[in-house]
Image (tube, grey):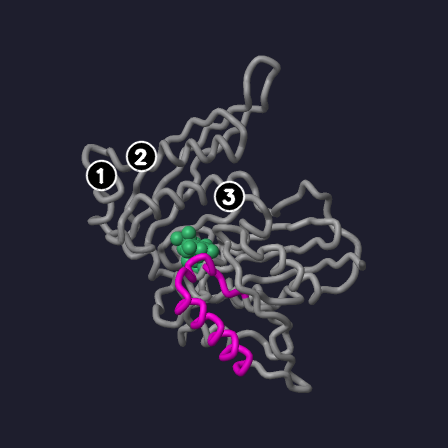
Amino acid sequence: MAHRVGFVALVGRPNVGKSSLLNALVGMNLAITSRKAQTTRHRILGVRTTESHQIFFVDTPGIQHSHTAALNRQLNRTALSALQEVSAVTWVIEAHKLRPEDEAVLARIPPAMPVVVAMNKADRLATEADKAKAFALVAQLQSLRPNQPDRPGFKAIVPVSAVTGFQVDVLAQALADCLPEGPAQVDADTVTDRSTRFFVAEIIREKLFRFLGDELPYEAAVVIDQFSEEPAQADRPARLAVAATIIVGRDSHKPMVLGEGGARLRQIGSQARHDIAAFCDAQVRLDLWVKVKENWADTESLVRSFGYE
Ligand SMILES: Nc1nc2c(ncn2[C@@H]2O[C@H](COP(=O)(O)OP(=O)(O)OP(=O)(O)O)[C@@H](O)[C@H]2O)c(=O)[nH]1
Ligand SMILES: [Mg+2]
């Protein structure tokens, strides 16, 4: 069998499970996930290497059309620009329903681009009625992109679960089939192009998103102020010291992040430290601060200054 190689983007509306799928496809928790919309803010590359293919997966922010703040516009730009650099696209939807927001994303994918549909969260199809709905959805999907000479239909429609791993390999194979033949481009140990520093900031943001209820909108960012690594010695593990600031958009958000007597910030810090230690295989010291920058998510220059571009 020929070895295939190339870039594939994961696109879809917010919260359908693009980042969870990236992690499942790569076999490592690279992209942060949460039940809140627009958890992903950066293009993140994850490399899947097997005997038969090497796929460079590009996770993207959820594309949405209902919010127009500078941050949302920037996230849409990031997601749409990923379409320029790939050979195929995974259009991620939920297995149990298709929403108009899903179709709006499909409309942004160039007509000639090979598309595989990932019907994610298939583990949620518990009853026979759910399964019948999913079958009906497959038929509906086929009619959305019928095969035409200048406009190929979907390359495959794959029910999948990022959480249980159901059919993740099938999805990967369907995508590999869309890619050109070629040798592996990087060694099997290379899983991403991002730095440790980047992942440290992301892990902190994940805990922030998870520990704060819906009261804290997505208007929170994390900036790393200090980052120093000491390699492992014969008698001790590697050490990492990090100081980071959580930026919120309003005065009233600061006490939400701090919690009663700072309890919530301590919780966020301790969970983040735990995950950073596992990710970096190091002893971690983490200092967290909270700062207010009024309406940063509405201000193009501040959005850019926090690294969103
Ligand atoms: N049951 C189930 N839940 C899933 C599955 N995949 C993702 N989820 C959940 O769906 C929520 C959103 O997952 P994410 O991976 O963050 O979704 P996303 O599409 O990357 O979201 P944005 O980055 O905000 O656009 C999380 O709570 C996940 O745990 C799945 O296969 N089954
Ligand atoms: Mg995501």
Which residue type carries mark 3? Phe
At mark 2, the secondary structure is: helix
- Residue under label 1: 259
Q: Is residue 168 left or right of residue 207?
A: right
Label whose residue precedes the other's in the sequence (2 or 3): 3
Q: Position of residue 181 (x, y in %)?
A: 78, 62
Question: Do tag 1 and tag 2 residues touch (Cβ < 8 Å)?
Answer: yes
- Residue under label 3: 198
Q: Position of residue 116 (x, y in %)?
A: 59, 68
Mark 1 nearby-residue class (10 Å; few <14, some 14–19, many ≥20): some
Q: Position of residue 58 (x, y in %)?
A: 58, 57
Mark 2 nearby-residue class (10 Å; few <14, some 14–19, many ≥20): some
Front residue (pair 148, 96): 96
- Residue under label 2: 267
> Can residue 166 be found in the magenta stretch?
no
User: Is label 2's Cβ within 8 Å of ligand 1?
Assistant: no
Q: Determine which quarter of the picture holds residue 225.
A: top left
The residue most toward the top is: 235
Which residue type carries mark 1? Gly
User: Is label 1's Cβ within 8 Å of ligand 1?
Assistant: no
Distance from label 3 to label 1 (Cα)?
A: 26 Å
Q: Residue at x 41, y 59 (%)?
A: 124
Front residue (pair 260, 287): 260
Q: Classify the position of ligand 1 by quadrant: top left, top right, bottom left or bottom right.
A: bottom left
The vertical placement of 11 against 108, above or below, is above
Which residue type carries mark 2? Gln
Front residue (pair 13, 233): 13
User: Is residue 26 visible in this depiction of the protein?
Assistant: yes
Q: Residue at x 38, y 64 (%)?
A: 70
Q: Is residue 248 left or right of residue 45?
A: left
Provide the residue span drawn in magenta: 118-144
Label whose residue precedes the other's in the sequence (1 or 2): 1
